[in-house]
Image (cartoon, grey):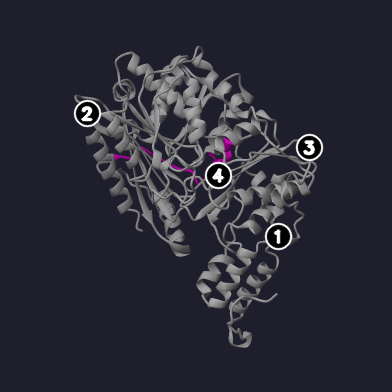
Amino acid sequence: MALAGSLTLTPVSLDFSVTDLIERARKWIETDPDPGTRRELAAVIDSGDLDDLESRMETALTFGTAGIRGEVGAGPGRMNRAVVIRTTFGLADYLAGATRPVVVGFDARPTSRSFAEDTAGVLAAAGIPVLYFPKVTPTPLVAFAAKHLGAIAAVVVTASHNPPADNGYKVYGEKASQIVSPVDLEIQAGIDDSPGAADVPRIEGVFDGTSEFVRPVPEDILDCYWEEVSDARVRTKGSDLDIVYTPIHGVGGDVLLELMRRAGHNSVTEVPEQAEPDGSFPTVSFPNPEEPGALDLARDLAEESDADLIIANDPDADRLAAVVPHAGKWRNLTGNEIGVLLGDYVLSADPDPGRAIVVSSIVSSPMLSRIAAHYGARHESTLTGFKWIVKAGLTLEEETDARFVFGYEEALGFTVGSTVRDKDGMSAGVIFTDLVADLKDHGKVVTDRLHELWRAHGLWVSSQVSIVREGVEGSRQLQEAVARLADNPPDRVGGREVVAVTDYRTGGEFRPLWLGAQDLVELDLGEAGRMLVRPSGTEPKLKVYVDLCGVVTGDPDADQLALADDAAKLGEALSGSLGV
């Protein structure tokens, strides 16, 4: 195959590893079915930029516990059609002989539709039926469709709230929840054994009706979704709340607005500059509602209209952010605050809370466990990642006569009821709005309820510190820091006594599957709270989490600010002692 450009390579003068790198890149080009990425990788070879070539070829995107995610571009270390085709080959190999369908959906990023069509084309060529969403679709609606339609699996092409340059491939299993090991390992084995992408059997143009195996999802899928969301509501009427909403250029806008209309929350104003799905995210530098600046346009609009509430979804609509007016200003609620408010709201209305199960990730606030105990409900902690939250809830439902009613993680992920077996920012948005409306009916606002919960269950605050170390050496340093802390834990941190230490790297066989071995160390501060240290699973960071519990002695906000300052100082003290 002729390569673009005029660079002449002389193998005899090159180091063998460089020659091998270039040869592997050329072989990848030969098996890439996309002419655009073939030209892109050929241009990298011709440029002589070996660092760029190595970043694309040396470390392939691997299929993890839910799928793959990375920057779009040419080569096995980027997201592209060849990688998607080979990944789907592995999935099809795992599902060989399946007669139940796979549901396929995609977000609004520029490459998402073509990646989704390749996914459906490979599955169809393998004789596996596909039900697909013809238009951009929120991730929770795809997950719901998989459950409702009895699918064997689902694939969503999305990079969620990642930067505009990225894309991803997320997989749900036969229970319509994100897959966990060993399923991911079995699919990865199929990927490893796959031929070059050009040699993977694939039917082209399946979204245009070229295969009887590929059909659109039923048109009433949103009606079915709404029916279950409606059943999960505590409130049975609408409200006169003035609400500002932004999907941050994502795909949740139309669905969220329709849900609000059906719920009777009719005064919802969408931020016009961010209303249309646009994978380039022109008004934000980072399309994550947790990031500074992401909700500035929503705040401005809410200020102009004197709104009661701001809600936001991330671009694939599986996360929910909320901002409320308080003391003449707009106050961002943290994921933990939304989590405990929703958890309390759901349990307070449950006719049989003693049979209820609520679940949160281990790095989320312990306050939910206090609330659950108050209602006589069962609380479980899990590893980070929503797949573990759902795994715990569904497993405990199967093993007992209890019901999984609520789960959350501090990174703005929530699920209420059994509508979606994953985080769902749309249904959570409706039910959180219901909560605000109920409070308004009783002459209260959100912070009033938060203060009541602090008085009843302890004033809980949370803080995080991140230590960034890039590269392989940086990763090693971070893991060594966790090991040192486990081997030589402090007796005190910032003047607070450490009463116990748990090293989650060991003893996983004695804990539930959803709380197995991981690089995590917990320092128990007794009634005062706890501290956690773990390397991030997705970023080159060591994260220090601090959760402190105090009491409301006077002004709840002043007490909260003082305790939050203590938590921040504790986090800095511990991070400074880790030796990185």
Per the rendered image, the range of residues in magenta is 497-517
Q: Is mark 3 on a helix, strand or loop?
A: loop
- Screen quadrant of the N terminus: bottom right
Residue 165: % across, % down: 49, 56
Whole-number angstrom distance, CA of label 1 to CA of label 4: 23 Å
Give the label on residue 107, or none: 4
Q: What element carries label 2?
A: loop
In the image, 440: left or right of 346? left
- Tell us which disc is closer to us: 4 or 2: 4
225 falls in the magenta region:
no
What residue is shown with label 3? 99
Q: Are marks 3 and 4 in contact (CB under 8 Å)?
A: no
- Tell us which disc is closer to us: 3 or 4: 4
**Amino acid on which disc 4 is placed:** Asp
- Screen quadrant of the C terminus: bottom left
What residue is shown with label 1? 197
Whole-number angstrom distance, CA of label 3 to CA of label 2: 58 Å
Residue 532: % across, % down: 40, 43
Visible residue check, residue 366:
no
What residue is shown with label 2? 327
**Viewer-proximal residue, 420 or 274?**
274
**Amino acid on which disc 2 is placed:** Ala
514 falls in the magenta region:
yes
